[in-house]
Image (cartoon, rainbow, N blue to C red):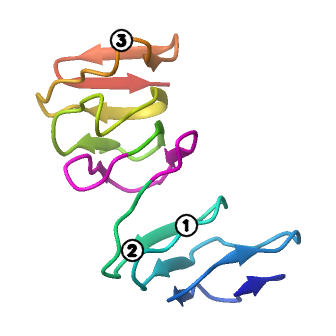
């Protein structure tokens, strides 16, 4: 499937059961959901409003890819079921992003960055590979198991 223009008037859900190749046009994605519903699929590098996977395949992040959790509602960084390369947190909700399990060098193979918002590690450890980093922007505030960036 090659998309050259997505201009929905109301939020929509688009199910992709095979290959998704975004075109070069600009896209209006506000409020819409892209659902990868097939088996093993490559999730194209693209700015998604809401991305879900409901198929039977396995999510495998590219070796240099970055997943950016930048929602306005509560989100969970699911490291117990998925492995990521790099992760950036930019959630602006009052709940922010919660960690669902301990971070290891296996489930996040690159860097973890809190750029803005709230990050609640839930008491779980964060242990990245020795050559990787957990970065928090200068204006972040730490309180118990929460990190807040403004």
Residue 26 sits in quarter: bottom right
In front here: 125 or 12? 125
| CA separation in Å, label 1 and label 2 | 10 Å
**Is 99 on the left or on the right of 72, as rendered?**
left
Q: Name the N-terminal-most of marks 1 and 2.
A: 1
| Cβ atoms at labels 3 and 2 below 8 Å apart | no
> Which corner quadrant holds the N terminus?
bottom right
Residue 148 sits in quarter: top left
| CA separation in Å, label 3 and label 2 | 31 Å
Question: Which mark, residue 130?
Answer: 3
Kindly identify which residue carries mark 2: 53
**Is 41 drawn above or below residue 113 in the view shown?**
below
Q: Is residue 69 magenta?
A: yes
Please provide the residue range marked out in magenta. Answer: 61-83
Residue displayed at 46% across by 17% down: 135
Residue displayed at 35% across by 82% down: 55
In front here: 71 or 63? 63
- Magenta stretch: dominant secondary structure: loop
In front here: 86 or 72? 86
């Amino acid at each position: 499937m090659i998309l050259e223009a997505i201009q929905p008037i109301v939020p929509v859900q688009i199910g992709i059961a095979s290959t998704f190749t975004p075109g070069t046009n600009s896209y209006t994605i506000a409020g819409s959901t892209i659902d990868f519903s097939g088996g093993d699929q490559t999730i194209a590098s693209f700015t998604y409003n809401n991305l879900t996977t409901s198929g039977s395949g396995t999510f495998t992040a590219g070796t240099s890819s970055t997943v950016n959790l930048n929602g306005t509602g509560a989100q969970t960084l699911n490291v117990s079921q998925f492995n990521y390369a790099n992760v950036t947190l930019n959630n602006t909700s009052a709940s922010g992003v919660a960690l669902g399990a301990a971070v290891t060098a296996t489930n996040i193979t690159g860097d973890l960055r809190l750029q803005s918002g709230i990050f609640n590690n839930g008491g779980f450890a964060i242990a990245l590979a020795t050559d990787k980093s957990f970065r928090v922007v200068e204006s972040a505030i730490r309180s118990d198991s929460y990190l807040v960036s403004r």
